[in-house]
Amino acid sequence: MVIQTIKGILGARPLYWVPPAATLEDACDHISVHRTGALVVLEDGDLHGIITERDILRHASQRGGFGTAKVAQVMTRQVVYIQTNGSIAEASERMQAGGFSHLPVLDMGRKVVGVLSHADIPAGLRRGWAPAMGAPVAA
């Protein structure tokens, strides 16, 4: 079976998120409990940002801990994303160009449905994708 879209890679994976008003401690707890590297930041179902382990660690190391900081103060607001019908090659290119390891995934109605991780890229390759070409390869 060849997985041709981001939607196929994500499958039925749950969406993990926090609101902008959540504390960094709350975000860190969610990341730990759900064993994920990033959370999308949603308010009323709309994408407001993304926060990663790296964002939280950078903030904590620069300030000596979480303090009272809120997710909205630390999150990335200019979010690069991919849509569910995108290819693994597109996702890989966006991650490499932006220097990040997580991409929110939006459906055609621009609703957030998941987060793609850099770790999913090799999984896509193992399922038959050649990112440099953006097309399935024969198994």
Image (tube, rainbow, N blue to C red):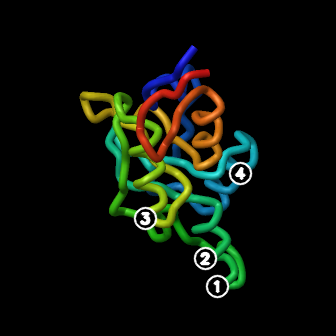
Q: Residues within 10 Å of mark 4 (few under 14, many from 20)?
A: few
Give the distance between the C-alpha atoms of the residues marked 3 and 2, in whole angstroms.
20 Å
Give the distance between the C-alpha atoms of the residues marked 3 and 1, in whole angstroms.
25 Å
Badge 1 amino acid: Arg
Q: Residues within 10 Å of mark 1 (few under 14, many from 20)?
A: few
Residue 52 at x, y = what percent? 58, 59
Please name the residue that numbered disc 2 is placed on: 59
Please name the residue that numbered disc 1 is placed on: 63
Label 3 or label 4, whichever comes before in sequence order: 4
Give the distance between the C-alpha atoms of the residues marked 2 and 4, in whole angstroms.
16 Å
Residue 114 at x, y = what percent? 48, 35
Residue 98 - label? 3
| Residue sitting nearer the eye, 35 or 68 | 35
Mark in the foreground, 3 or 4: 3
Badge 4 amino acid: Asp
Q: Residue at x 64, y 35 (%)?
A: 123
Residue 50 at x, y = what percent? 46, 55
Residue 139 at x, y = what percent? 61, 21
Residue 29 - label? 4
